[in-house]
Image (tube, rainbow, N blue to C red):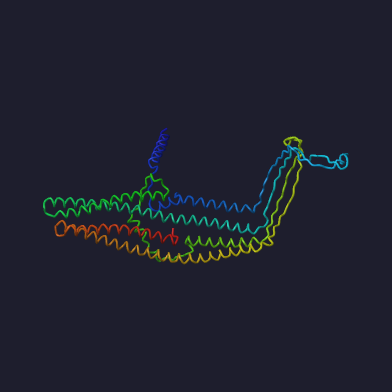
Amino acid sequence: MKSIKLIVAFLLSSLLYAQENEGKYAFTLEEAITHALENNYQAINASRGVDAAKKRKWETTTIGLPQINANVNYQNNFVLQKSVVPAEFFGGNPGEFQEVEFGTKHNMTANATLSQLIFDGSYLVGLQSAKVYLQISENAKEKTDIEIREVVTNAYGNVLLANESVKVLESNKKILDQTLFETQETFKNGLIEEENVEQLQITLSQINSSLSNAKRRSEIALNMLKLVLGIDIEYELTLKDNLDELANKNIDLATLSSEFNVQENIDYKISLNTQESNRLLLKLEKSKALPNLAANLNFGYNSFSNEFSFLENDQKWFNYSNLGVALNIPVFSSLGRSARTQQAKIAYEQSKTQLKETEQQLLLEYQTARNDYEFSIEQYQVSKDNLLLAERIERKQGVKFKEGISSSFEYTEAQRQLYATQQTYLQSMIDVINKKTALDKIINKK
């Protein structure tokens, strides 16, 4: 009895926990990518496209397999067609005609046909084309997954950037509020000019405006990430990674020295699919000059009656069967077939040129992405060093300002320089993440 109570309590607690966590998500970047690859709306439809291509491949295959069709036909001749014959056949006068009716009021036929394609060049090419079509769908799915990985990374980074911007601005606001309070108190005692207070008020107003905007951007960025992940916007989403750790994790100098195999790039694979499709199209046009051969076998029964008695046991049915073979030989098409073949050949040559162009473009894109990534790493380190310098300058100017050695203008300039450097530093971390993702996309690194 005690064990039953424990089981019930465990089930109830599990149910309550599931209800409390329904609509709540928490992801690292890699977890977010994994979730998006399964739940993103485009990813779902891309998977369905692959499934549809597999069904289409089988549909093409079945064309060359045996086909069986059966049918039942019933005919009610409520007015039989009349004809005339010489009356003398029935003992009448020569030159006269007698009206007669041929057939019965009720006819029924049941038959089955077995057909088999023996040879058709177009069918053989169609089988190869179906395989290529499946490859195209699979490559389209792969391209969608690669793009989703990039979009999720960018969206995830934008949320982290917005959140960090809010934190930095809130920290700046807190410090500035305290400085403004102390400056106002000093002004009340007549030790400084009012301009010092006004300069700080202007800076604080700008900080408040930037903070409000950053909070709005943070909410929008989070909702954009939910959309990419395939999560309802009203659900709760928490990000486990932080911007600094993610940026450092994406600094991979080994990637800069790795070899680039253009054939691994998904755009190259898609261009190769196009070339193969055009090659098969050319082959298809050539195959139309070949004969095709098919056979069919028919089995059937006929029955006739002036009353509807086809369901009775003593109703007579007359069977029949036949075997047929059909050979179709293309002889002359007034050079129309040749014109179509030449068009297909031109399209094939164009696709080979396009493949070469794609290869060269990808080599250039790799060089650009590699350079951008290397530059982003350098800028990240420079921004990090500059931030330390800006913080030191701002602290020194703050001390000088409080001691009356420095003017409010010099102090606010140091503050603005610090705020700009903070945003530059945050942006440099995002650039490292995004540029690394762009480079991984080109080299097809997963």
Reply above or below: 238 against 445. above
Q: With 433 as the anchor, is 404 left or right in this view?
A: left
Q: Which quadrant is home to the C terminus?
A: bottom left
Residue that appears at 16% across and 57% down: 401
Q: Quadrant of residue 195?
A: bottom left
Q: Pinpoint residue 218: horizontal percent, then vertical percent.
A: 33, 50
Q: In which quarter of the image is residue 380?
A: bottom left
Reply above or below: 177 against 248. above
Q: Pinpoint residue 445: horizontal percent, then vertical percent.
A: 44, 60
Residue that appears at 57% across and 63% down: 279
Q: With 290 as the anchor, is 393 left or right in this view?
A: left
List the single residue furthest toward the front.
95
Q: Quadrant of residue 400?
A: bottom left
Q: Nearer the viewer, residue 333 or 1?
A: 333
Q: Which of 387 and 287 is in front in this view?
A: 287
Number of dots carrying numbers: 0
List the single residue furthest toward the top.
1
Q: Pinpoint residue 433: horizontal percent, then vertical percent.
A: 37, 58
Q: Which quadrant is home to the N terminus?
A: top left
Q: Pinpoint residue 386: horizontal percent, then vertical percent.
A: 27, 62
Q: With 441 as the anchor, is 214 left or right in this view?
A: left
Q: With 426 as the anchor, is 136 left or right in this view?
A: right
Reply above or below: 95 against 193. above
